Image (spheres, rainbow, N blue to C red):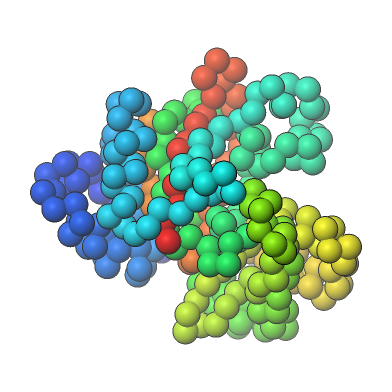
């Protein structure tokens, strides 16, 4: 387990850095492209009016910002959809509302699995967190890969096969379903997973998941939700987390709904 202190930087390192591109280059070299493969920058920007602009100008130094839907949105706000949630009983919430619109926890995934090449870096700046819950969960999928290889190689074989993914949010893309493996080769390691999009991908294709594949997905889910592979961090308003999205899966713990001003994060993808 990486030393927790190793995963934190304070914003003064950015403010003091005259050459932002050099700072970003070092960040990739020292944190994102090698263990721990993620970084939290505390107090990146507290001023809500400046957060968006600062996130965008900072991200450009990491690479090319990529759109998150067919409307071309380069950043999205992740917060519960109070209008939708109000109408649905809690037990049925995740069937009716998308994960990012809910206040549910779990569902450890990678971002952009519906893209031909998922974004390399995922940046999320916290605008406001919930009082209770809402911790960010990160999981190193290389460790999970090694664990499966050692203990259940038959599942790894299945997880390296192609699965259908709904290209959700990219309606203009044809075909609307993508066929890709969950784990790719060890040399150019890549993890691609969001179970909801796989299930809807199969529904669109009117295809059924084989029993073997379904069991391998269930096994993967148990490992992703196993605490021994997870690290949890609570972001405060103004904190930024950056993940290597090809290696680190992420999720969150459930959180309390503040009806006036709920938990909210700004998300950006970089190629
Ligand atoms: Fe996500």
Is 19 in front, or is 39?
A: 19
Q: Where does the N terminus fall, quadrant-wise?
A: bottom left
Instruction: Residue 236: tell me if it is visible.
Output: no
Q: Measuring from the top left, give residue 136's x and y in whole percent.
A: 49, 45
Instruction: Residue 116: tell me if it is visible.
Output: yes
User: Residue 84, relative to residue 198: is it above or below?
Assistant: above
Q: Measuring from the top left, give residue 202's x and y in whole percent.
A: 81, 62
User: Residue 80, relative to residue 76: is it above or below?
Assistant: above
Q: Where does the C terminus fall, quadrant-wise?
A: bottom left
Relative to 71, 219 lies left or right: right
Residue at x 12% of width, y 44% of height: 16
Relative to 167, 51 lies left or right: left
Q: Measuring from the top left, give residue 174's x and y in whole percent.
A: 69, 62
Residue at x 57% of width, y 44% of height: 71
Snapshot quadrant of residue 215: bottom right
User: Residue 11, relative to residue 171: is it above or below?
Assistant: above
Relative to 191, 41 lies left or right: left
Relative to 233, 196 lies left or right: right
Residue at x 56% of width, y 20% of height: 258
């Amino acid at each position: 387990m990486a030393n927790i202190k190793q995963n934190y930087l304070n914003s003064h390192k950015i403010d003091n850095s005259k050459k932002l591109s050099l700072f970003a280059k070092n960040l990739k070299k020292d944190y994102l492209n090698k263990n721990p493969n993620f970084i939290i920058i505390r107090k990146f920007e507290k001023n809500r009016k400046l957060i968006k602009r600062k996130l965008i100008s900072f991200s450009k130094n990491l690479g090319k910002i990529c759109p998150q839907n067919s409307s071309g949105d380069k950043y999205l706000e992740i917060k519960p959809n109070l209008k939708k949630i109000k109408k649905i009983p809690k037990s049925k919430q995740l069937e009716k509302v998308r994960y990012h619109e809910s206040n549910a926890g779990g569902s450890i995934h990678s971002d952009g699995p519906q893209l031909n090449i998922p974004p390399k870096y995922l940046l999320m700046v916290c605008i406001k967190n919930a009082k209770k819950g809402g911790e960010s969960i990160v999981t190193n999928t290389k460790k999970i890969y090694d664990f499966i290889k050692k203990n259940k190689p038959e599942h790894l074989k299945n997880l390296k096969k192609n699965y259908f993914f709904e290209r959700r949010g990219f309606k203009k893309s044809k075909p609307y379903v993508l066929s890709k493996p969950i784990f790719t080769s060890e040399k150019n390691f890549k993890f691609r997973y969001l179970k909801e999009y796989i299930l809807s991908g199969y529904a669109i294709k009117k295809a059924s998941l084989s029993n073997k594949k379904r069991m391998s997905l269930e096994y993967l889910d148990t490992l992703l939700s196993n605490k021994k592979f997870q690290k949890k961090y609570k972001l405060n308003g103004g904190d930024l987390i950056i993940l290597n999205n090809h290696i680190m899966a992420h999720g969150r713990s459930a959180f309390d709904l503040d009806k006036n001003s709920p938990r909210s994060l700004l998300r950006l993808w970089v190629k």
